[in-house]
Amino acid sequence: MAKDCGNHGRDHLFRSIITCVAFLVILVLLIVLIVFLVLRPHKPKFYLQDATVLSFNASSPNVLSTYLQLTLSSRNPNNRVGIYYDGLDVYATYNNQQITLAATIAPLYQGHNDVDAWSPYLRGDSIPIAPFLVDALTQDEADGFFFLWVKIEGRLRWKVGDWKSGRYHVFVNCPAYLSFDRSNDSSFPTQMIRFRQSSTCTVDI
């Protein structure tokens, strides 16, 4: 009988330990879920506010030179979460081909509901382009307008109190609608009408 009582006591102790561990795991998961729901960070919002094409020239054989200035802004929509940008690279594309070198925005911290703006210059000198892009440019010039896409790539971290998250890749895509300046008679005008309509960008993290 003593042996049976001993086994019964060990089984009861084992079940108690299992119950306590399960309770602690559930409690930790519940706390993590509550913190996530309360502090869940929202993606930053990016806007292309202005784009001025200072030069846009195509020449033989299939070479494009581009020079433009942009005004970009970013807003942190979070009330309790700050954002560290660990460097952002900005470049322009036309028909899915990169046509400028990347301009780097220095690392910065964006506080709760803060807004930051940048005005980088993007340049691409004698960038080789696919032959079909020359035809596309000719058609766009005949239509009187064309699209550029301004892209931003980099890393960010979330900050809650003294805690900082790991680095996340951020990719931003901004459409830029521009019109050709008809006052220029060249095949590929060097001046474009200034883009003035603010454009909302898509953000993937």
Image: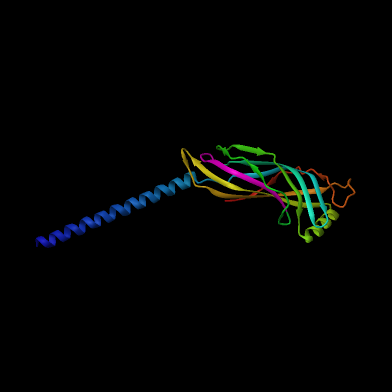
Camera-side residue: 69 or 3?
69
| Color style of the picture | rainbow
The residue lying furthest to the left in this view is: 1
Range shown magenta = 78-93
* Quadrant of image for the N terminus: bottom left
The answer to whether residue 29 is magenta is: no
The answer to whether residue 85 is magenta is: yes
Considering only vertical position in the picture, is 120 above or below 131? above
**Residue at 78% across, 58% down:** 133
| Residue 128 position within the rendered picture, expressed as x and y whole percent measured from the top left | 76, 55
Mark count: 0
**Residue at 44% across, 45% down:** 35
| Residue 140 position within the rendered picture, expressed as x and y whole percent measured from the top left | 82, 55
| Residue 19 position within the rendered picture, expressed as x and y whole percent measured from the top left | 28, 55
Question: Is 115 left, or right, of 100 in this rendering?
Answer: left
**Residue at 87% across, 52% down:** 187
Question: Is 10 left, or right, of 190 in this rendering?
Answer: left
Question: Is 188 left, or right, of 96 in this rendering?
Answer: right
Q: Main secondary structure of the magenta part?
A: strand
Considering only vertical position in the picture, is 162 above or below 124? above
| Residue 80 position within the rendered picture, expressed as x and y whole percent measured from the top left | 51, 39
